[in-house]
Image (cartoon, grey):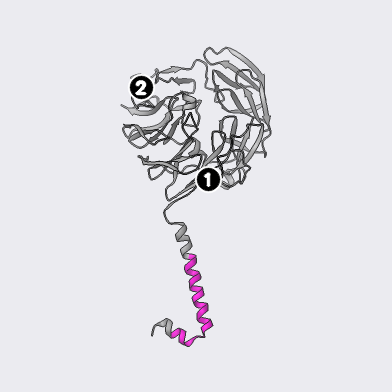
Amino acid sequence: MTIFARAAARAPWWVWAAVVAAVLAVVSCISVPLLVLRPGSRLSTAEVPYPAPAAASVGVVAQLRAAPLILDRRLRVFATHNDVWAEPLAAPEGTDSYWSYHRWPAEVVGIVAFGAADAAPPVVVVKWSDGLLVALHAERGDIAWTTRVQTKDSDEYWGRRTGTRTVYGDETLFSLYSARSGSSPVVISSGDTKVDAFDPISGRQLWSVDLPTCHGVDWTGEQVFATILCSDGVHTIHLYDAGTGRPAGTWVPPWLSASSTSAERSWIRWLTACRTESSECQGFQVRREETWRIHADGSVAKEPVVSSDIDDRIAGDVVVRRTDGRLTGLRRDTGDQMWQIPLDSRRVIAADAGTVYLLTSANDLACVDGRTGTVRATVQLPGAGWNAYSMYVTDGFVVIERVNPDARERDGDRSYYYGSRPVVLATC
């Protein structure tokens, strides 16, 4: 007779039933987490029609828990640790997802979005820490294609709670968007020693380039891929045609010479006029006082006007400068003043082809026409006593991530972010 049988013989039936129920409850509590933690993926596709384009009327659209990419004025697309999801662009905060994609234990390391162009549908491309590159049909949320790419040692999720650094600022996945560059769309993935480019619609590989291990801080211009190699101890930009992968030229600062110090040879660049932090950038800045433009053919020319002022912004053919309570528009090619207006602003936070976006001293959003200096609109943003950490703009929609005034990078998310929904989506 087993132990359980002997115990059953000695105890009343109701005691034994209670013991069995308790054991089953414990087993259930253990098995549920095991099911949740099982490696794999989960895809939830759209169950309602594709949202209509949202009107860019002036005002605050929503306060969000994460930072989105904006796609075709129809969707806001998010990415956090193990999840990618989309919501209708004009939906209020707290709305259900339109579609979603979850993977575990792989982490999201990069995401780019391509809007519809001609007959090509909108696509979202996600790079995961295990090297899986996944394209999702934005209209439905189902998988269009997948492939494997090389990763970097640093490829992991860096976005904290809102996903901002991963959604806007990663240096492992890049886009060239046909509507802006005039060329076919390209998605480019950068690994430790290899760069691969794909057609984001079909998944067809366009080209591949092997690079030495000493490379990094990659980005894309409007029609080129750029990477910095430390050739012979000198940082050198190598440029490649985005459509073919053919070399398009190299560049080093003209002030470098044989007598340059080690620090000068390891110069640092800051990107300018980008669609996101590292994609479709018009140029770069070195030594703060020098800004250079990368043309479509890979040639590099010095910008005649853009200065070391951190609040200089390029809005199409205009350089907008903030100094001493005034905002000035200068011709990009000559520096001639086009307009000047008094504007009490804390900082210029972004610009697109036709508009400059500023935060006023009251934390309102002011939207200024880049060619005329006319203040198109001023939007009162919710809350007070916050700082703007990151900003993204497209199609008249503005995303601002808010942090607490004394926030430090090492702070926990509760102390770092301004509230539970720190991201503001507005239009103006």
Residue 218, x across and y down, in percent: 41, 31
* Residue at image point 46% right, 87% down: 9
- Please tell me which of labels 1 and 2 falls first in the chain: 1
| Magenta-drawn stretch contains 15 | yes
In the visual, does 237 lie left or right of 113?
left
**Where is the C terminus found, in terms of image quarters?**
top right
| Magenta-drawn stretch contains 2 | no
Residue 411, x across and y down, in percent: 54, 45
Q: Is residue 424 among what the camera can see?
A: yes
- In the image, residue 41 sits, relative to residue 90, either above or below, namely below
Give residue 46's mark: 1
Q: Identify the amino acid type marked 1.
A: Ala
Q: How many marks?
A: 2
Query: Of 34 and 419, which appears nearest the observer?
Result: 34
Mark 2, residue position: 248
**Where is the N terminus found, in terms of image quarters?**
bottom left
* Predominant SS of the magenta segment: helix
Query: Of 323 and 33, which appears nearest the observer?
Result: 33
Closest to the camera, between mark 1 and mark 2, is: 1
